[in-house]
Amino acid sequence: MTPLRIGIIGCGNIGARIHLPTWLAHPEVAQVVALADPTEVALDSARQLAGLAPEQVHADPVHLIARDDVDVVDICTPQHLRREVLLNSAVSGKHILCEKPLAAVPLDAAAAVDAAEDAGQTLAMVHNYLWLPEIQAAREVIDSGEIGPVRTIVVNYLGVVDVPGAAAYRAGWRHEAVSSGGGVLMDMVHGVYLAETLLGRPVRRVSAYVSSREASATVEDLALCRFETDANAALVNIAWGLGPGGIEVTGELGRVSVRYRDGGTAPWAPVEHVRVHTASGMREVLGPDEREMTGIPQPIMDSFEQVLLDFADAVRTGRPAAAPGRDGLRILEATVGAYKSAVTGELVGIPLDRDDPVFRHGVLGLKKLSLPEWSPARGTSLYSAG
Ligand SMILES: NC(=O)c1ccc[n+]([C@@H]2O[C@H](COP(=O)([O-])OP(=O)(O)OC[C@H]3O[C@@H](n4cnc5c(N)ncnc54)[C@H](O)[C@@H]3O)[C@@H](O)[C@H]2O)c1
C-alpha cells in the first residue's frame, strides 16, 4: 500500500501537536510531505518534528496546494481562513480533511462541499468526539434497541476550558467574532454534532439563548440550544466556565447516562461511567477512566487517530468518511441558526435560506436582521466585527 502524501496547512496547537504526530505514527498509511503556516516559528518547529527540508514548507498555503507530490490537504487553520484553501484544494484535485467547523460562514462551507463533490474528491470533517469511547458505547446501546427509539438527548458542556490560540499567532482569535464565527458554541461545536448523531436524524429547527459576562465581548461565553429533528429533540448547553458536564440519552424504554469525573465536562474530566437504566435495572457499559488527564487527554489523542485512519481508508476505498463535508455544512448551519434564534427569538429552520444574511455572512450577518428590543446583539458589541 503506497502511503498517502499529506500536506498540513496550519501548524498551531491542533496541526503541529496533534495531526502531525498522529500522521507520523502511521508511516504505512501516510507520509507528511509538506507544511504551510505564515508564522515562521510555528512552521520551523513543525518542519523539524516532521524531518522535512526547507523547500517542503511554505509560508503561503497556495504553494503547498500547488505541489504535485501532495494527495491530501489537511486543514488546521482557524476557520475564517478556510474558503480559498478549501476551494483551491478541491479544484487542484486534492482530497481534504478539515478541522471543525468547516468554515466560519455557511456560504463558504457550501461552496467547498460543492467544489469537492464536483471534483470527485473526498472532503471529510474532524468530528473527533464521535470516536470517544463513551460516545461509541452510547451509540452501541442505542443501535441495539435496548432503550427503544430515542426521544431526547441532553448534552451539557458547561465547564469548557477556554484554551487560547497559539501565542505566536493570535492568542485571542477564538474570542473575535470575525475570526471565530461565534463563541463557545462554535468552538465546542462537538456538542452539536454529537447531539444530532445520538438523535439519529438531521436537525430541522433550532431555538437558543446566548449570553456573555463581558460587556465588550464580540462572542458569547454561554449558549443554551434546542435542536429539533422531525421525530425527537436535543438540549445542548455549552459554556466556558465551571458548570456541569455529562450526556443523557432518553429512549422510550430506558436511558443511557454518560457521566464525567465529579460531574465535569469532557474531555477535561475523564469518564466516570456510562450506565444503561431500563425497567430491568441498571448496568454499567463503561467504567471509570483512571488515567490522569494532563496535557492533551489520551482519549482525545486516540479519537484523532481514529479520524485520520478512517479518512485515509475513505480516500483509498472511495467510501464516505464517518463525517463527510456535507455533515460539517449542516452542523455549521445548525450552529449559526442557533445564533440567529438567540438574537431574534425566532425558531430557525435548517437548512438556512441561501439569501439569509447569516448564511451569507455567519454571525457578522446577525446585525443585519431585525432585532427585538431585548436582543443581546442590539446596541452591544456582541457579534460585531470588533
Ligand atoms: N477537533 C478538535 O478537537 C479541535 C481542537 C482544537 C482546535 N480545533 C480546530 O483547529 C483549528 C485551529 O485551532 P488551533 O487551536 O490549532 O489554533 P492555533 O491558534 O493554535 O493555531 C493556528 C495556526 O494557524 C496558522 N495560520 C494562520 N493563518 C494561516 C494561513 N493563512 N495559512 C496557514 N496557517 C495559518 C497560525 O500561524 C497558527 O500557527 C480551529 O479551527 C479549531 O476549531 C479542533
Image (cartoon, rainbow, N blue to C red):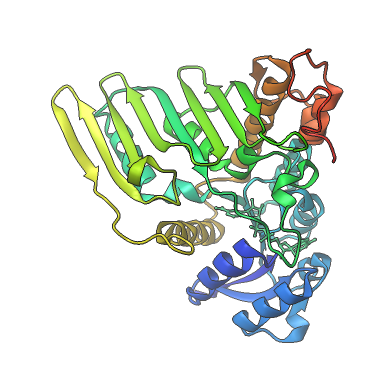
Q: Please state the horizontal and vertical placement of residue 121, each as a whole percent of the image.
A: 66, 54
Left or right: 50, with 230 as reference point: right
Which residue does the image show at 42% across and 27% down from the upper left? 153
Q: Residue at x 86, y 24 (%)?
A: 368
Q: Quadrant of the C terminus?
A: top right
Is any atom of residue 51 visible in this view?
yes
Which of the 4 quarters of the picture holds residue 291?
A: bottom left
As drawn, 231 above or below 359: above
Camera-nearest residue between 304 and 265: 265
Q: Position of residue 66 (x, y in %)?
A: 80, 68
Q: Please provide percent x and percent y for residue 346.
A: 68, 14
Q: Nearer the viewer, residue 209 or 4?
A: 209
Instruction: Give the image location of residue 93, x and y in percent.
Output: 73, 60
Using the image, determine if residue 60 lies above or below residue 383: below
Q: Residue at image x 85%, y 39%?
A: 385
Q: Is residue 191 left or right of residue 176?
A: left
Q: Quadrant of residue 88?
A: bottom right
Instruction: From the viewer's perspective, tell me whether residue 28 is left or right of residue 70.
Output: left
Quarter of the image holding residue 107? top right
Q: Is 177 in front, or is 275?
A: 177
Instruction: Identify the residue at image location x=27%, y=34%.
Output: 144
Q: Is residue 326 visible?
A: no
Q: Is residue 160 above or below residue 142?
A: below
Q: Is residue 276 above or below residue 72?
A: above
